[in-house]
Image (spheres, coloured by chain):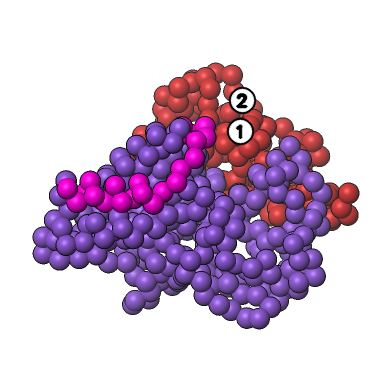
Amino acid sequence: MSKKMHIKLNVNGKNEEFLAEPRELLIYTLRERLNITGPHIGCETSHCGACTVTINGKSVKSCTMFVAQADGAEVTTIEGLGGPDDLHPLQEAFKEHHGLQCGYCTPGMITRATKLLEENPNPTEEEIRFGMAGNICRCTGYQNIVKSIQAAAAEMNAAKEAAE
Amino acid sequence: MIPASFEYHRPQDMAGVLAVLEEHGDDARVMAGGHSLIPMMKLRMADVPHLIDLQDVGGMSDIDVGESSIRIGAMVTQAEIIDHAGLAAAAPILREAALQIADPQVRYMGTVGGNVANGDPGNDMPGLMQCLDASFTVVGPDGERDITAREFYEAAYMTAREDDEVLTAVTIPTPKGGYAYEKQKRKIGDYATAAAAVQIVKDGDSCASAAIAMTNLSDTPVYSVDAGNALVGTSVDKAALDAAVAAMLGDIDPTEDNRGPVAFKNHVAGVILRRAIERAWSRA
């Protein structure tokens, strides 16, 4: 066993400090060490996107990052986007437009979609499909996921205009 | 899937990286985005007792678009290639290829340096760099040297880079003429069943020069001199296309795997190269 490292992370605005082996994968840190169970383990081979979180402004598959690499990083998970009483517009839209069935891929989908809409606030259907290509859903056939993201984009753009 | 344990190093400069490489030799590996190496470590196909994370080293994240050449730091990510307007104007084939690599999450992490240095025949950038006649700068204990992409790849995961050297930059002569990177893959995130990089210069109605390289059809990328020569001096008509495809098929050496048998791969390679040449010619 290699020696443990002193790791500092900021997860959803909260500072965390702990000792961990460098080989610990970030998804395990989040789920098992910090009890942040929104990001899921799907394929564990960087294909499915269920473990997607935002790290320093990038969408990252947290099964393919060692906690040592993330030392000092800011991490946002689905828990940091909104809760049951204050849903993020994307969470609201997925609920409204049936953008999920079993829900397993949903935290990764929504976390990835926040970044997509940040980079492209008004995406076409094709841009959504291309920008969400790293997230796999086995239930919906993607139709309603696209619809949900389009609806959330419209909602977020309207809110932005109203605020200006 | 937990990898074997390792010692983690995060040096702040290249001298620190080289010191760890010198101390631990074969037991040390450098890592950029980690999206090739970490999956291999998780599958325990790569044993890395000393992992050197390059994220804090600095000086390898710039894209410099010059008059006659383009220099791309090894730590530039595929996402940065896609987003760089100056690069897209000077060498649009890079953006076209990067958009076909993996998926958005992987492109935020995956780097140009990692993609070319890894020596995986499935990676797209090696063939592309051979097509563009790029050279790779590596630095080691004896200083810097440049190795051309066309001489870099020896076998799967075997390259002209020595174990104590680090690939720091890719330099590309500014490409001329029409371009295409065409890739057939089974699904998003898969490596190519076959991919072709083509850059063509047109003079009047005839082809003045053509560079053609193929991906994942041998244990190294394949730069096919004969395929390019088959187009030169022609109007890139059907006879020239047939000759280029035949020449390319003589240079590749695909093996059967879960992407299909050899006959299928040869077939797909022909289809993909034909499309790539036609598209590059239409843009020339």
Q: Are marks 1 and 2 on the same chain?
A: yes
What tint does the image give chain B? purple
Please name the residue that numbered disc 2 is placed on.
A104
- The image position of residue B61, as x and y in percent, is 54, 67
Q: Which residue is disc 1 drawn over?
A: A50
Q: CA distance from mark 1 to mark 2?
A: 7 Å
Left or right of residue B205: residue A53: right
Query: Amino acid under label 2?
Result: Tyr
Chain red in the figure, letter:
A
Residue sitting farthest toward the bottom: B142
Horizontal and vertical percent position of residue A40 = 66, 32
Please provide percent x and percent y for residue A52.
Answer: 60, 39
Residues B126 and B57: in front is B126
Q: Please tell me the numbered disc located at residue B175.
A: none
Query: Residue most toward the front?
Result: B250
Residue type highlighted by circle 1: Ala
Is residue B204 found left or right of A92 in the rendered image? left
Q: Residue at x 79, y 36 (%)?
A: A32
Q: Earlier in the sequence, mark 1 or mark 2?
A: 1
The image shows residue A97 at horizontal and vertical percentages of 46, 22
Quadrant of the image for the N terminus of chain B?
top right
Give the magenta range.
B239-260
The residue carrying pointer 1 sits among few (fewer than 14), some (14 to 19) or many (20 or more) residues within 10 Å by Cα, namely many
Q: Is residue B259 visible?
A: yes
Q: Are marks 1 and 2 in contact (CB under 8 Å)?
A: yes
Image quarter of the C terminus of chain B:
bottom left
Q: Quick one: A44 or A140, which is closer to the camera? A: A44
Quadrant of the rendered image containing residue A107: top right
Chain of the residue under label 2? A
Dot 2 alpha-carbon crowd within 10 angstroms: few under 14, some 14 to 19, many 20 or more: some
